Image (cartoon, rainbow, N blue to C red):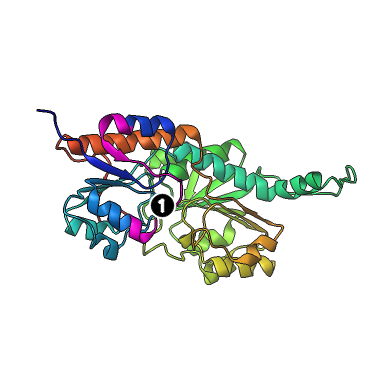
Amino acid sequence: MPVKRLSVVVTRRLPEVVETRMKELFDVTLRDPDTPMSREELAAAMRQADVLVPTITDTIDAGLLGQAGEKLKLIANYGAGFDHVDVATARQRGILVSNTPGVTTEDTADMVMALILAVTRRIPEGLKVMQSGNWPGWSPMANLGGRLGGRRLGILGMGRIGQAVARRARAFGLQVHYHNRKRVRPETEAELEATWWESLDQMLARMDIVSVNCPHTPSTFHLLNARRLKLMKPSAVVVNTSRGEVIDQNALTRALRAGELAGAGLDVYEQGSELNPRLHELANVVLLPHMGSATIEGRIEMGEKVIINIKTFADGHRPPDQVVPGMF
């Protein structure tokens, strides 16, 4: 007698190779067209599926989990971040949650450096001049940016991505500093030539560039608030590729408009795709549409991790990337 295949609902389109493998292994419902599911669609999916495969665009809160059917036993998140899923409520309802950690480390660290370079060397401004067709020619004082070598980089969150950023930063001649919940091992500090700051306030006041690489948790919400942004030097730059909620976006906008900060490079935003419109007006701000992990290699590896988590669960074992309340 054939073994019954798990019913799996995927909320967004994934790379073709990932979808093909899912169809081979599971009774899968794929998303077409590639648009975020409405709350009603998510509720319906959670009533019909054994496994839901959501992404960051799906907010799965206690109210939605309350509408889940008895079948739903696993939320296999496509992505490392899971603050859009109420993990504690899911656990109370007997629903496991998994994620895909480690896959996007190198890609996101690359994007951190890209944003640092873009802001400090004024690359978007140069592109705009060239694309306008009105470049008047080279001038010794035109488009002057700043040299990276010798500057102090403060990394907020020294996990996998923070350490990958530190390795890249050293190659550019940046001095690496960091603030973390816990100090990293001495051998890691030595390898990265990184200086730990127990006080975030003291670190911020002395940095030329600050990179946000910590997860969004209740303790990191608005960690960079108006008070802390005012501690930073007017010549400093802020880069965020982690979670938008870590920075008070309105306070950051005010600081940039007032000349209290030299610039910002943002790939994530506090209200998802909704930005403070005044950010668009600032020449010293580089805005990207959440591209930090956007490589085909990374997307496929994320899909492979999702499949492994589902397959392991189907075989009666704990998913290797299971998330439990209080992990961060």
Q: Residue at x 63, y 48 (%)?
A: 151
Horizontally, residue 73 falls left or right of residue 260, namely: left
Relative to 291, residue 246 above or below: below
The residue where tag 1 is placed is 56
Other-residue count near label 1 (Cα within 10 Å), few / some / many at <14 / 14–19 / ≥20: some
Looking at the picture, tell me which residue is in the foreground, 176 or 13: 13
Residue 234 position within the rendered picture, expressed as x and y whole percent measured from the top left: 67, 63
Q: Which residues are magenta?
A: 22-41
| Residue at the outermost left position | 1
Residue 250 in magenta stretch:
no
Residue 116 position within the rendered picture, expressed as x and y whole percent measured from the top left: 62, 47
Q: Residue at x 49, y 34 (%)?
A: 296
Horizontally, residue 281 falls left or right of residue 160, namely: right
Residue 118 position within the rendered picture, expressed as x and y whole percent measured from the top left: 66, 46
The N terminus - image quarter: top left
Residue 37 in magenta stretch:
yes
